[in-house]
Image (cartoon, rainbow, N blue to C red):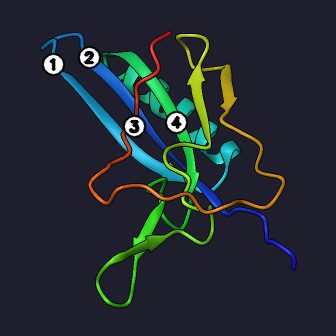
Amino acid sequence: MTQDALRTKWKFVVEFEDEETKEISGTIGQADTREECEGVLEYDMQYHDSHGRIVLNAEAVEVCAKCEGEGQIAAMNGGLVICDACGGRLGPISNLTTLRPNGTEFLMIRRGDFSGPLSPRRRPDNQRSVLHRLDP
């Protein structure tokens, strides 16, 4: 039996403060690859900086493309089943955060080894995964 590579995508957030109004806001998005995600994060940070906003935080997570890090997908009968793509993994596979305020360097933290077969893992239906903020 062969296993295909785990298909992933990147989800990101950029939090910023308007220098004039002191209002804190953010932008969210997603990208197919790490390189695309880094490019969009850099662009987003430069855009907000050039429009009078202070970037407070920029980070991204790599998640399973099929279940988006939830570990479960909808079944035909309306229930939930363990995601067959990631074996039910909860949360991010990798985290990406900026090392410098200008967003020119990023640190990627891998959350495990996904080169071998993935075994299904069960969880209670009421448990939710949460995107945790990385504080520098």
Mark 1 and mark 2 in contact? Answer it, CB < 8 Å.
yes
Q: Position of residue 129 (x, y in %)?
A: 38, 45
Image quarter (top left, top right, bottom left or bottom right) of the N terminus: bottom right
Q: Position of residue 101 (x, y in %)?
A: 52, 10
Q: Position of residue 100 (x, y in %)?
A: 59, 10
First-in-chain label (1 vs 2): 2
First-in-chain label (4 vs 2): 2
First-in-chain label (4 vs 1): 1
Query: Relative to residue 45, is residue 71 depicted above or below?
Result: below
Distance of label 3 from label 1 (alpha carbons): 23 Å
Query: Looking at the picture, which amino acid does disc 1 mark?
Result: Glu
Distance of label 4 from label 2 (alpha carbons): 19 Å
Q: Which residue is mark 2?
A: 17
Query: Looking at the picture, which amino acid does disc 4 mark?
Result: Ala
Task: Give 4 or 14, whichever is nearer the viewer.
Answer: 4
Residue extending furthest right? 1
